Image: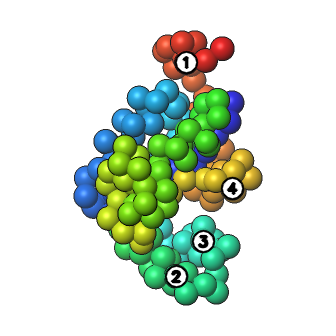
C-alpha cells in the first residue's frame, strides 16, 4: 500500500477545520495510520521547505508554518497520493475546483489550508521529517476489503 504525508496548516487549525478535512479523507476510503499536533520549529520548517530556499516566498512560508500548530498525518491506500492531490485541489484556492478542500476552504495561495506530498519520494521524505517509524501504525480497518480489489 502507498503512503502519503498530509499536513493541515495553521489556517486549518485556527479556523477549526481539522475534523471536516480529516472526514473527507476517511470518506474517500483513505486509511489514517499516523496523526499528531505539531508546533513546527525553524529547523523543521526550513527542512520541510528546503527545495524553496532562496525563493522570495521561502521566509514568509517558514514563518507562517511556525505561527501556529499544524496537524501532521500519514494516510495509506491504493493510489493514495493521487487521491489526496485530487481531494486537495489546485495549490491556489482561487483556481481550485469548488468541491476540493482548497476550493471549499482556502482563502489565498499563502493560506491554502493543506499540504500534501506530490510523489512517493516526497512522501517518504516528509513522513520521516514528522514521524518516527513506531508512530506509523499498522492495523486492519473494518470494511477495507470493500474499497478495491
Task: Bin the neighbour count of mark 4 within 10 Å (Cα to Cα): few under 14, some 14-19, many 20 and up.
Answer: some
Q: Which residue is mark 4?
A: 122
Question: Of helix, strand and loop, which one carries label 3?
Answer: loop
Give how far apart the Cα atoms at labels 2 and 4 are. 20 Å
Q: Earlier in the sequence, mark 3 or mark 4?
A: 3
Quadrant placement of the N terminus: top right
The CA distance from mark 3 to mark 4 is 11 Å
Q: Disc 4 on helix, strand or loop? A: helix
Estimate how packed mark 2 is, as few (under 14), some (14 to 19) or many (20 or more) residues with alpha carbons within 10 Å: few
Q: Could you tell me if the residues under marks 1 and 2 are in contact, i.e. CB atoms within 8 Å?
A: no
Q: Which mark is residue 147?
A: 1
Q: Position of residue 114 (x, y in %)?
A: 44, 56
Q: Mark 1 Cα within 10 Å, few/some/many (few <14, many 20+)?
A: few
Q: CA distance from mark 1 to mark 3?
A: 34 Å
- The residue under the point 69% across, 51% down is 119
Query: Which numbered dot is residue 70?
Result: none
Report whether residue 24 is seen.
Answer: yes
The answer to which quarter of the image holds residue 95 is bottom left
Q: Answer few, some or many: residues within 10 Å of disc 3's Cα (few below 14, many 20 plus, some between 14 and 19).
A: some
Residue at the disc numbered 2: 57
Q: Nearer the viewer, mark 3 or mark 2?
A: 2
Identify the mark nearer the N-term, 3 or 2.
3
Alpha carbon of mark 1 to alpha carbon of mark 2: how far? 40 Å
Q: Nearer the viewer, mark 4 or mark 1?
A: 1
The secondary element bearing badge 1 is classed as loop
Q: Are marks 2 and 4 in contact (CB under 8 Å)?
A: no
The residue where tag 3 is placed is 49
**Label 4 vs label 1: CA separation?**
25 Å
- In the displayed structure, would residue 55 be above or below residue 31? below
Amino acid at each position: 500500500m502507498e503512503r502519503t504525508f498530509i499536513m493541515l496548516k495553521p489556517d486549518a487549525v485556527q479556523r477549526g477545520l481539522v475534523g471536516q478535512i480529516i472526514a473527507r479523507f476517511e470518506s474517500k476510503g483513505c486509511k489514517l495510520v499516523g496523526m499528531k499536533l505539531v508546533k513546527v520549529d525553524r529547523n523543521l520548517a526550513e527542512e520541510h521547505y528546503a527545495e524553496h530556499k532562496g525563493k522570495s516566498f521561502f521566509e514568509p512560508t517558514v514563518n507562517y508554518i511556525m505561527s501556529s500548530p499544524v496537524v501532521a498525518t500519514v494516510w495509506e491506500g491504493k493510489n493514495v497520493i493521487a487521491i489526496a492531490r485530487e481531494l486537495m485541489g489546485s495549490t491556489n484556492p482561487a483556481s481550485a475546483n469548488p468541491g476540493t478542500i482548497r476550493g471549499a476552504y482556502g482563502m489565498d495561495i499563502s493560506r491554502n489550508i493543506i499540504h500534501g506530498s506530490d510523489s512517493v519520494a516526497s512522501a517518504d521524505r516528509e513522513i520521516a521529517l514528522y514521524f518516527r517509524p513506531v508512530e506509523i501504525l499498522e492495523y486492519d480497518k473494518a470494511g477495507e476489503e470493500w474499497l478495491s480489489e
